[in-house]
């Protein structure tokens, strides 16, 4: 039971941090409903089991990303929440000769609100993990996203970094 309590507290902290960032940018409703799907049993239970030991202590981070239940819950989460860049990747199956099926993808541009919420989410994750906003810039470079979306997110992130440095 302790693992579920720890996960619940971590989710509430994350939601609070995202709400604060969304509020700064005028996304009041998006801040309130951010990541509500994380409370669904299909996401909450596998994530709690993957991230926390039964006694409530965090699990070994190296084992989390290979856990199939964790990976499925993350996939569900990304597909249920449009502020995740992975939600905007459209798979295309193509057949090339005897090589069989190859998966190719088309990356669609995110809308403005989703892109801003994505930045708020990223800032909250970095803050919760005691990281720096420069780490967020590095993370953006690894995510699959449309060039237009990446530029929009990097611009919003740069503004947030500027606000942070000015102390606002």
Image (tube, helix red, strand yellow):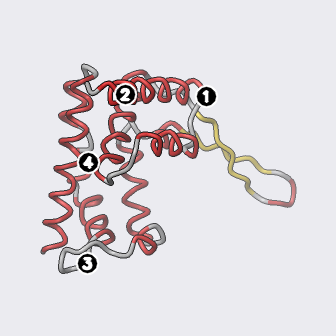
Contact, mark 4 vs mark 3 (Cβ under 8 Å): no
Numbered label attached to residue 147? 1
Q: Which residue is drawn at 20% across and 25% down?
A: 28
Which x, y percent locates residue 85? Answer: 48, 39
* Sequence-first disc among 4 and 2: 4
* Sequence-first disc among 2 and 3: 3
Which x, y percent locates residue 165? Answer: 35, 29
Q: Which residue is drawn at 78% across and 50% down?
A: 95
Q: Which residue is drawn at 83% across and 60% down?
A: 99
Compared across the picture, whether 150 is left or right of 6 comes to right
**Given this view, does label 2 or label 1 mark the residue nearer the observer?**
2
Q: In this view, does 146 lie above or below 41?
A: above
* Residue picked out by circle 4: 37
Image quarter hosting the C terminus: top left
* Sequence-first disc among 3 and 1: 3
Which sits in the foreground, 93 or 140?
Answer: 140
Question: Is the residue marked by circle 1 packed among few (<14), some (14-19), or many (20+) residues within 10 Å?
Answer: few
Residue lying farthest right?
A: 97
**Given this view, does label 4 or label 2 mark the residue nearer the observer?**
2
Contact, mark 2 vs mark 1 (Cβ under 8 Å): no
Q: Is residue 65 above or below residue 145?
A: below
* Sequence-first disc among 4 and 3: 4
Which element carries disc 3, helix, strand or loop?
loop
* Residue picked out by circle 3: 53
**Given this view, does label 2 or label 3 mark the residue nearer the observer?**
2
Numbered label attached to residue 160? 2
Which element carries disc 2, helix, strand or loop?
helix
For the residues labelled 4 and 3, the Cα–Cα distance comes to 22 Å
């Amino acid at each position: 039971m302790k693992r579920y309590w720890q996960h619940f507290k971590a989710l509430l902290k994350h939601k609070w941090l995202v709400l604060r960032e969304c509020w700064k940018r005028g996304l009041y409703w998006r801040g309130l409903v951010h990541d509500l799907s994380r409370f669904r049993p299909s996401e909450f239970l596998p994530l709690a089991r993957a991230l926390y030991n039964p006694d409530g202590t965090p699990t070994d981070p190296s084992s989390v990303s290979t856990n199939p239940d964790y990976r499925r819950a993350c996939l569900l989460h990304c597909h249920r929440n449009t502020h995740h860049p992975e939600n905007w990747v459209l798979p295309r199956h193509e057949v090339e000769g005897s090589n069989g099926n190859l998966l190719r993808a088309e990356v669609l541009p995110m809308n403005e609100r989703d892109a801003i919420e994505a930045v708020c989410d990223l800032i909250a994750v970095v803050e919760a993990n005691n990281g720096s906003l420069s780490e967020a810039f590095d993370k953006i470079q690894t995510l699959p996203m449309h060039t237009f979306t990446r530029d929009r997110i990097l611009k919003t992130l740069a503004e947030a970094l500027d606000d942070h440095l000015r102390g606002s």
